[in-house]
Image: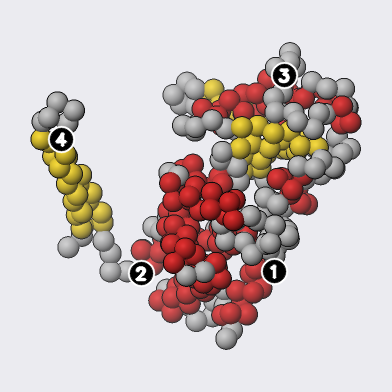
Amino acid sequence: MSTVCCQAALLYTSSRGERRIRVHTLCLPVSSQPSVLYSKLNVVAITGVLANMAVDRATSSSIGDARDALLNTVVDCTKMYRSQVASANCPPFTLPSSLAQLPLFVLSLLKNPAFTLSSRISYDVRAQTMNLIKSTPLSYLMPTIYPSLYALHSLTEQNVVETETGETVVQAPLLQLSPENTSRYGIFLMDCGHSMYIWVSSDAPDALVSKILGVTNFEAIPEDMTTIPVQDNESSRVVHMLLKQISLSRQHHVSLIVIRERSQKRLLFVERLLDGKTDNGTSYYEFISHILRQLGK
């Protein structure tokens, strides 16, 4: 058998009192080769399932048990892949290319307000985040788990391209969520799903601050700035195109907050630099070292 079919039926009554049935059929290929199966895995879908399972474990047991389950997922996946597919001389920590981002996404979940052990996270914030995980569609949930980071100061009209459908889009390079990538002279945009943060470094040139934010210099940025003006210059046009592009990709309102480097709101941005060491957890490289120690047991 080369395929397997799944079918679900929904029987319901329309607003006119008519009884109707809706049938969904999904036909999927199957394989007896583990290597083929591993190559087709969807790490984003897996992350969504893990996040929902972790919420269930946290509410039925404890946050600690949920964290252990997430960590064990990476360890178990690595052991299983090595035993079934990888060759004997492969490094201890080996995953298929389809799961290359799994450790990073699991680390992001461990630092998420729903599962972090930080004492600064209130019960209300934790409960709200768990509810968000359980109720948000996957495509909207992923930016809240692992945000997207862009360097606004390096965007030009060369980043604006036309797609095959004739749509004009901004192709902005993604940056790793590491403090090393936020230079003291730049302005950055972080897309966190329901919110966007513009981070302004303390030594950002006055001319750049003026072009993008419409104020004279870094010190003139208001603490409560939530909008930026449209201006007649290249930087402003491209930045507003990117902001609009992100907003239109969501079915909900996306708020914008401008954060100065020394602002009281700085933790909103800094704590989401998930690849680096934060108050909520270790850096990515420390996490990989921890995984290696677990594999060696």
Amino acid type, label 4: Thr
Label whose residue precedes the other's in the sequence (3 or 2):
2
Q: Nearer the viewer, mark 4 or mark 3?
A: 4
- 100 sits to left or right of 256: left
Q: Residues within 10 Å of mark 4 (few under 14, many from 20)?
A: few
Of all residues, the one furthest to the bottom in this rendering is 297
User: Label 3, on which residue?
Assistant: 229
Q: Earlier in the sequence, mark 4 or mark 3?
A: 4
Q: Which residue is mark 4?
A: 13
Hey, which quadrant is residue 42 in on the image? bottom left
Percent across and percent down for residue 79 are 48, 77
* SS under mark 1: helix
Mark nearest the camera among 4 and 2 is: 4
Classify 281 as above or below 125: below
Q: Is residue 267 visible?
A: yes
> Relative to residue 59, is residue 213 depicted above or below?
above
Check disc 4 and report its element: helix, strand or loop: strand
Instruction: Indicate which disc, 2 or 1, sits on the residue closer to the N terminus.
Output: 2
What's the CA distance linking mark 4 and mark 3? 50 Å
Q: Position of residue 71 (x, y in %)?
A: 54, 70
Quadrant position of the N terminus in the picture: bottom left
Q: CA distance from mark 4 to mark 2?
A: 44 Å
Q: Residue at x 40, y 76 (%)?
A: 84
Residue 106 is labelled as none
For the residues marked 1 and 4, what is the alpha-carbon distance in whole angstroms? 55 Å
Q: Which circle marks residue 34 in the picture? A: 2
Q: Which residue is mark 1?
A: 286
Q: Indicate the position of residue 187 as horizontal and vertical percent values.
A: 77, 35
Mark 3: which amino acid? Pro
At a point 53% along the width and 61% down the height, the residue shown is: 102
- Amino acid of disc 1: Glu
Residue at x 61% of width, y 37% of height:
195
